[in-house]
Amino acid sequence: MEVLIIIVFITGYCGIAFEHAIGINKTATALITGVLCWTLLIISQPSDYLLNSEAWAHFLRINELMEPAAGVTSTNENYALY
């Protein structure tokens, strides 16, 4: 799924670069590209590489710091589903 997200991003980036040639506004292209990339990310199952990466560990630590500030009482048990 990561490859598909990269393809969508590169296509959107090219759409922004060739704005005058294709006649579509940069803003519209960027919004559509962003929505498609985030949608693909949300509906995809994270790969083992991502879940075992250092970036995921940092995300979990940041999430633990942000939960009390946001008033959220959940724990990292939600992430154990993956």
Image (cartoon, grey):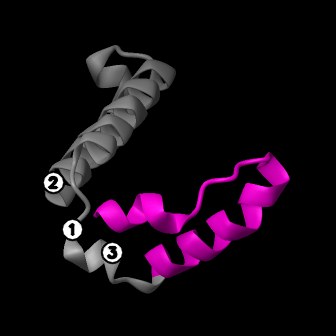
Q: How many marks?
A: 3
Q: Name the residue at 44% across, 17% down.
A: 25
Alpha carbon distance from label 2 to label 1: 9 Å
Q: Main secondary structure of the magenta part?
A: helix
- Marked residue nearer the N-terminal end (2 or 1): 2
> What span is colored magenta in the figure?
55-82
Amino acid type for the residue under numbered disc 3? Leu
Which mark lies nearer to you, 2 or 3?
3
Q: Furthest-right residue in view?
A: 69
Amino acid type for the residue under numbered disc 1? Ser
Crowdedness near tag 3: few (<14), some (14–19) or many (≥20) residues, C-alpha within 10 Å: few
- Proximity of marks 3 and 1: CB atoms separated by less than 8 Å: yes
- Proximity of marks 2 and 1: CB atoms separated by less than 8 Å: yes
- Marked residue nearer the N-terminal end (2 or 3): 2
Residue, disc 1: 47
In the rendered structure, find residue 1 and report the number of the disc placed on it: 2
Image position, residue 46 (x, y; %): 26, 61
Image position, residue 58 (x, y; %): 57, 78
Q: Does the magenta run of residues contain 64?
A: yes
Left or right: 49 as drawn, with respect to 77? left
Amino acid type for the residue under numbered disc 2? Met
Q: Is residue 42 above or below residue 77?
A: above
Alpha carbon distance from label 2 to label 3: 14 Å
Looking at this view, is 77 or 56 the one in front?
77
Residue, disc 3: 51
Looking at this view, is 2 or 23 the one in front?
2
